Image (cartoon, coloured by chain):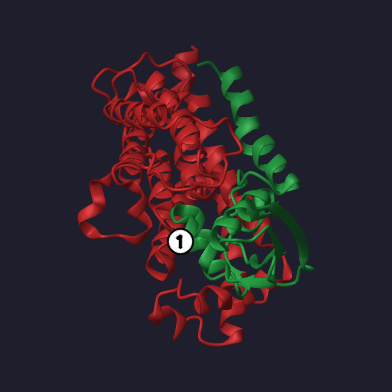
Chain colours: A red, B green
Amino acid sequence: MPVNGGVEALGRARVALGVVFLLRTTPALAPLHISFLADTIPLLGWPDGHTHFTPFVPALPAALLAVLCIVRTLAAVAFTLGVHARAAGLVAGALGYVTVLQDPALFLTTHHVIFLGVMLLACTDAVGACALRPAPILSPVSSAWLIRAWVASIYVWAAIAKLRPDWLDGRALGLLIREGLVRPSAASTLLATDARRALVAFGVVATELLLAPLLLFGRTRRMGAALAVAFHLGLEWAVSPDLFGWAMIALLLSFFDFLNRFEPQPDTRAATA
Amino acid sequence: MKARAHLIIGVVACVVVPLVSTLTRAGGLAFTMFSGSGSYRLRVVASGDAGERRVPPTAVAATARGSIGDVLAGTEDWRFGPFGSIVRRRLDQVAALACGAAPGSRRATVTLEERRTLDAPIRTTTAVAACR
């Protein structure tokens, strides 16, 4: 039964997503002057004294918000290192929502994937591997399936959101180009004409729909994960969509359970006998 | 956690949360993966003793600053972005901010036009604030 390799893979995904969490919520990448990370100084969601839209969740005093931003960061560090990672991940993810939703304009799909991903990994045996203080392994098979199913569902929902005329005929991509959100070299080649934009738009939806079954079936799982990584690297090159692609690649690490591939499997007939 | 807990968590995370978010079109908890093509624009009118005058939304943005300023800036014309629904739900707040951009006014009227997609009909919402 694929156990050890799956838990190790989940552990690697936990570390990787923890790193992405910290990169997206702290000024660790500030020296690179990446525009979409400007809101991470001093920490994402830190009270800045400016006017914000009134939150759709209970509003917090500035001092409490600052404390929660610090606690969130410490919890994310513990989650990444694997020290009380279950509790730390749940705290980090929950405080991620609480702090960022204080400003509704700040909340993005990238945050949602990172925060929920950290909370889900904290609920699995990802906390039992690649950790300074590994937690007991309780249910490795259902742990792996929870993360696999969730990652696959993200692609399904993403495809469903694009099943509409203005995406499928390429006009939405044209809008992204007009807004300067697409790399000029991609806009002038791959997406230069209406026909090419429609083809690429259709290809994106088809890829997302294809990824879900590929990721869920055992025989195609690694191939699906490799295709998904390539898909995100392509999007990263073309549109650099925040750290979304890197968060997804971190989660996709849970599909690469190399130990199970290379270690001899137990003889189930002998075990039964 | 055990398998039963994982099953329940999985159903909530994979189905319930994104489905509810998709159906209600609120909250941004569906995984839309940068598929949006929504846009919005604002019209701000301040009225007082001297009559009515248009106030550029960018002037309101300059008064507000911060993320709310980022969302309102440039909305004299259609602006592409996912913020139309947030502006609609907080249009009273925008109207109150418009008072600050039009000193001496007695009332600020803010009209939001938004399109959820390129083909969607224009949805118009208006809010009025009494200025002090």
Where is residue A188, by image quadrant? Answer: bottom left
> Which residue occupies the foreground of this view, B49 or B41?
B49
Classify residue B126 as left or right of residue B78.
right
* In the rendered image, the vertical position of residue A236 relative to residue A176, given as above or below: above
Looking at the rendered structure, the kind of residue marked 1 is Phe
Residue in the image at 49% along x and 46% along y: A221
Q: How many labels does the image show?
A: 1
* In the rendered image, the vertical position of residue B33 relative to residue A247, given as above or below: below
Where is residue B82, by image quadrant? Answer: bottom right
Q: Is mark 1 on a helix, strand or loop?
A: helix
* In the rendered image, the vertical position of residue A82 relative to residue A102, given as above or below: above
Label 1 belongs to which residue? A231
Residue B108 in view of the camera: yes
Classify residue A158 as left or right of residue A219.
right
The chain under label 1 reads A
Residue B116 in view of the camera: no
Residue in the image at 34% along x and 53% along y: A37
Q: Which residue lies furthest to the front in this view?
A: B49
> Which residue occupies the foreground of this view, B6 or B67?
B67
Q: Residue furthest left?
A: A31
> Which residue occupies the foreground of this view, A194 or A269?
A194
* In the rendered image, the vertical position of residue B101 relative to residue A87, given as above or below: below
Q: Which x, y percent locates residue B66?
A: 44, 53
Q: Which x, y percent locates residue B104?
A: 60, 61
Where is residue A242, by image quadrant? Answer: bottom left
Q: Which x, y percent locates residue B131?
A: 64, 53
Local crowd at mark 1 within 10 Å, few (<14), some, or many (≥20)? some
Q: Which x, y percent locates residue A174?
A: 57, 78
Residue in the image at 56% along x and 61% along y: B103
Classify residue A51 as left or right of residue A174.
left
